[in-house]
Amino acid sequence: LNQTIADSAGAVVDSSAACVFKICGLNGTELAQRLVPLVLVEGTRLSVLDNFPDLTLRLELPAPDKESLERLRDQVRALVGSYIYAEADRTLEEIVGALLLKKKHTLALAESCTGGYISHRITRISGSSVYYYGGVVSYSNDAKVLFLGVKRETLERHGAVSRETALEMAKGIRERTGATIGLSVTGVAGPGGGSTEKPVGTVWISTDSPIDHEARRFAFDGERERIISAASQAALDWLRRCLL
Amino acid sequence: LNQTIADSAGAVVDSSAACVFKICGLNGTELAQRLVPLVLVEGTRLSVLDNFPDLTLRLELPAPDKESLERLRDQVRALVGSYIYAEADRTLEEIVGALLLKKKHTLALAESCTGGYISHRITRISGSSVYYYGGVVSYSNDAKVLFLGVKRETLERHGAVSRETALEMAKGIRERTGATIGLSVTGVAGPGGGSTEKPVGTVWISTDSPIDHEARRFAFDGERERIISAASQAALDWLRRCLL
């Protein structure tokens, strides 16, 4: 990864004085709690940018010092672990793209509540056509049946927002396209469409690949755009973890 | 349409003193040229916000005056015409959504170079599931054949970025889904993939509906994200014009 370090004003800083971590899956408070045991050299500057759904952690030593910086990075890695998705100013879709390319995987998407936003994030990256087959925005039940082969019975019995539908969507897109990984998202982005059992923010994400076929339920807060953004981030992060 | 007028600092202004026009399909210079003949009451403030790919034109009289404001609006309508897509602070996807709903149409999308971004814009709007069936992101040739029924021969003879492919994509998505309108986009978002004949920024957009089946070629400038944004705007604007 190409490491570019900028200070808070955007000026480039000696890369033996500063480092950046991109983090997802934690909020600002959770990150702060994890960083409590951190031992800092006097004069070190620590900043967290909470740019939802991403966190950017920057650490800057008072002077360049390769060894101290490496010790600091090791501490952060031990405390934050796999929530770190990059040690440079990269986006999650760039990291996922690089992993798909490296592992020679191809991806196909089946999106409902995210409405094409994950596909947009993937295709923002130039060269994504090498690993991205394409996908389906199955915004209606008919689209889930027609393009993904989801069974009408599954939709009637469990609903469009369910483990069963998410699993069939991921399997359907993978089988039909021949991609090595199928990823699906189905949920309630709101503000309408929620119920006691499946409130607004309920999202099922599923992957289908040669090694697993799983689904997980997530519960996101906030407005429609925030739920779509959070769901896209969770889906891409799951994909990243599958590829590690 | 719900008319909310804010001054440049965001404060709400008497709606008989100010008005807003949202404009697309013109750049700032083209708009300025069209506005040259405008006759303004002394003290009127005119501002243009160029928030690509949108322009927002605001006009504010020195004091509330319903009649003068209506004359001013009439002048703007005459000079700018159908490039005005809203007379309030609305997005193009909101306007298109409201038109689809009003005209009882359903929409299905077939996106290549825009990679799901149009679908994302449509589904940002809450309630879009009433008029949006869903769509296909046919990022590979295989996806165009599998999900849209584009002929291999068309792709080989004319290429993925061509009038013929765009027409088959729009027809394919409409026929397969039963939506009343099919909209397709295929182009070169760059930075790679361009040629002398089809440089980066070449985009074909096609619609298929009970009343027409057309394709048009566009040439956009700039970086990948700007081309994707411009193509999504042109496609939504075409849809708006079809629905008027």
Image (spheres, coloured by chain):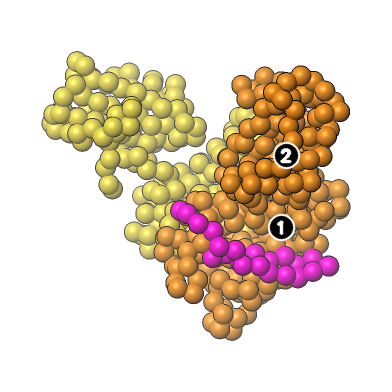
Chain colours: A orange, B yellow
The residue shown at (38%, 21%) is: B32
CA gap between label 2 and label 1 equals: 27 Å
Question: Badge 2 is on which residue?
Answer: A38
Q: Position of residue A44 (x, y in %)?
A: 70, 26
The residue mark sitting in front, 2 or 1, is: 2
User: What secondary structure is the magenta-colored segment mainly?
Assistant: strand
Q: Is residue A167 above or below residue B182?
A: below
Give the residue drawn at x 69%, y 53%.
A236
Which comes sooner in the sequence, label 2 or label 1?
Answer: 2
Badge 1: chain ID: A
Q: Quadrant of residue A146?
A: bottom right
Tell me the SS state at disc 2: loop
Place of residue A155 in the rendered image (x, y in percent of width and height, measured from the top left): 56, 78
> Element type at marker 1?
helix
Tell which of A195 and A44 is nearer to you: A44
Q: What's the magenta region?
A: A202-223
Question: What mark, if any, has residue A238 been given in the picture?
Answer: 1
Give me the residue at 60% from left, 70% from top: A144
- To which chain does the residue with label 2 belong? A
Q: Is residue A203 magenta?
A: yes
Residue B183: in magenta span: no
Report the side of A104 relative to B203 (left or right): right
Residue at far top of view: B42
Amino acid type of disc 1?
Trp
Q: Nearer the viewer, residue B87 or A193?
A: A193
Residue B105 visible? The answer is: no
The numbered dot on residue A68 is none
